[in-house]
Structure formats: C-alpha cells, structure tokens
Amino acid sequence: MIHTSGLVKRKNIIASEDAKAIACLRNAGAIPIALTNVSELCMWWESANNVHGRTSNPYNTNHIVGGSSGGEGCAQASAISAFGIGSDIGGSIRMPAFFNGVFGHKPSPKIVSNHGQYPQPITEEQNRFLGIGPLCRRAEDLLPILKVLTSNPASLRLDEKVDVKKLRWFYQESDGGSLIASPVAPEIRELFSKIAQHLDKAYNIKATKVALPRFLESGPMWFANMKSPDGPSFQEQLANLEGSINPWLELLKWTVRMSDHTFIGLMTCMIENAGVKYGDEKYQHMVKERNILRRELLDMLGDDGIFLYPTHPTSAPFHNEPLIKPLNFSYTAVINVLGLPATNCPMGLDKTGLPIGIQVVAAEGNDRLCLAVARELEKAFGGWVPPAVEA
C-alpha cells in the first residue's frame, strides 16, 4: 500500500513491509482494504493534505473529521469497514473517534508496537507518548482487536472480567478554565451528570467529581514534553529527510497555491523553535508538573479507578476553524504525556446533529477498565449513531 503520511514528496512511496501491528492483524485473518487520510505528517487535527485532499465529516460535510487519523474516523462512522487502526501522540485516535461518533482507544505505552509509523518518534519519551490502537463502531470490538494488536495480552489481563459495579468512578468536566482552549460546551458538560445519574440509579454508585488544577497546563505540558535534544527538525521532515525546506519560501509559494505543503505544516516549522527549549528551566518545570499530575492521577485511580474527562471541548468545528482554536487538542494530548490509556466513548449527537462523547482514562496497564466502561456507556446511552443518508 502507499505510505505517504500526507506528504507530497512521498506520494509514490509504497510500503516495503507491513507495520508490526498490521502484521498481527493479518496473522489473525484480517484483510486490509485501504489506507485512510491524515494531516500532513500526522501533525494536525484536521485531515487535509496536498496528496489526498481534505476529508469531511459524514454528519455534516462542512465540518472536520479530526486528525491525524481523521480519514479512519470518517470511515468507521460511515461503516466502510469492520474496524480501523489509528495512531495517537496527541489525540489522533480519540479526536477523530469523538468527531465521528465512534469508539477509539489509545493503549498504554508500548503495549502495541509503533514499528511502521511515519514519521517515527524521535525520542524514547515520544515513543511512549505514541500509541497505535483501534477505532470501531461497537465497544465490544475494542477488546478482541487490542488482544490481537498487543504482543503481551497477559500483561494487560485482558481476559480478566471487569465488574463496573466494583470500580471507583471519578470525573472532571473541564480543564478548569484554561484561557488557551475553548470552554467545554454545555451539552458535553451535561454528559457527566447523565453518567453520574445512570451509575446512581443502576448500581447505587456515587461518582466523585474532582478538580485537578494542573490540567490547566495541558497544552504547555504537551509541547514541552514533546521536545527532543536532537533529531530531525519539522522542516527536514517536510523534505522527507532529504535536506530541508525553506519555510518562508514555501509560505510565499503557498499564497499563490504553488507550495506542496499545507499552511499548518509551514506554520509548525516556523514555531518549532519558539518557546520552550529542551532542557531549559521552563522545560524542567513542565516535566516536573507532568510527573506530579501523573502521580496525582495514579494515586487517585489505583488499580480499580477510572477517570472521565472531555475528549474535546466542542463538537466537530468547521473546516479550517482549528486554525483559530489550535490548542483545543490539549484535552487529549495531556493524556499522552501522562502515559495513560484512554478510550473515546460516543454518547449521541448534540443539537446541531454532530457527535459528542467523553474519554475514559485508567492507570497505565489498566486498558481493560477503559474498555469495560466503554461497553457500559454504550449499553446505557446507545453509542454510535449512524449518519443520516439522503436518498
């Protein structure tokens, strides 16, 4: 299959071998039928590039599908295939799953091989942040797919039954009011109350509302922890590691539609060296804050706790709208740098007819809890709602 990663310079590249995750699926009898669209080099949350074009939301084509695995989110919502696979280093499985009303799971670090992902993670930390995982319409499909994908299912105790009545449930309705992300939409906030009411009525479980203030720093925390001491720059990546592009020249060409690159790709080049530098005081501070927040969550969750948190503050925005709301992805991105598994769970449509939902987070290695809660929420609230088909 082609292996472009949305980069024009790779438009004729054919993969020489399967990624290890895909090899696992083939060995289990899966038949890959297509590669789906992504953002340029998988580094933006709208799936548009100059190789394959732009993917539109099946619930309203004026809206985005998310990214970077946005084509797969759209494919699943449209019932094109039985299931799909995405990659997630800042929300690239969970945001497309959220915007397209399907389930998507980012696994615990390194339980699914990242071999074959392009671009490759530069540092060992980035390798931990990145996760390869499933997207699908039915929550019950997540577990068998993850069992095939992981090289060591026993370590995750995936065959161990989970009784949701014995779990401890925590939730937080927003990041606390960050000024760099949109407020959480009222209809998404209401989902937490609906879940709490369901748990109380069905199981006499009292979900605990929490307020962890370090979520306010989610965006800066992700950017700092993604920094690397060396390795290729983004402008070298845009040249497919064959030299480097001149982002200013390419931006000039972009204004007259002559550049091979997207606007956001060029902007990423220009801001890459701004702000936090690897190893500087701000970097050290954000690494420390990340570690403290991770410890707070692990202490709260233990081995039997789950944490409900917004996947995104709004339903799918209009095309190009992410350019004026770039840091809304921080709701998913922070979970990557915390090294925790998370599952997006669809919970119906908002008043505009677009999907909404929440993400379920557990302690590292407790992916089975996320998947069990996904099944419970699907049973209680219905899960995937097929897009309307106009005859």
Image (cartoon, rainbow, N blue to C red):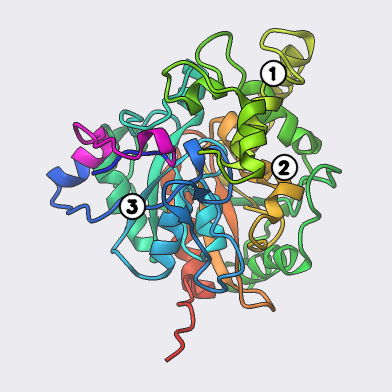
Image point 74% across, 20% down: which residue? 274
Asked if disc 2 and disc 3 are in contact, CB closer than 8 Å, the reply is: no
**Dot 1 corresponds to which residue?**
273
Q: Is residue 163 visible?
A: no
* Residue 307 horizontal/vertical position (percent): 62, 47
Instruction: Check residue 16 for magenta coloring.
Output: yes
Classed neighbour count for the residue bearing mark 3: other residues with Cα under 10 Å, few (<14), some (14–19), many (≥20): some
Looking at the rendered structure, the kind of residue marked 2 is Leu
Front: mark 2 or 3: 2
Asked if disc 3 and disc 1 are in contact, CB closer than 8 Å, the reply is: no
Q: Is residue 200 above or below residue 213?
A: below
Magenta region: 6-23
Q: Nearer the viewer, residue 192 or 64?
A: 64
- Taking the image as shown, residue 71 lies to the left or right of residue 199, namely left
- Dot 2: what SS? helix
Q: Farthest residue to the bottom: give it.
A: 391
Image point 79% across, 52% down: which residue? 182
Front: mark 2 or 1: 1
* Residue 115 horizontal/vertical position (percent): 31, 28
Nearer the N terminus, badge 2 or badge 3?
Answer: 3
**Dot 2 corresponds to which residue?**
327
- The alpha-carbon separation of the residues under discs 3 and 1 comes to 40 Å
**Dot 3 corresponds to which residue?**
143
> Taken as a whole, is the magenta stretch helix, strand or loop?
loop
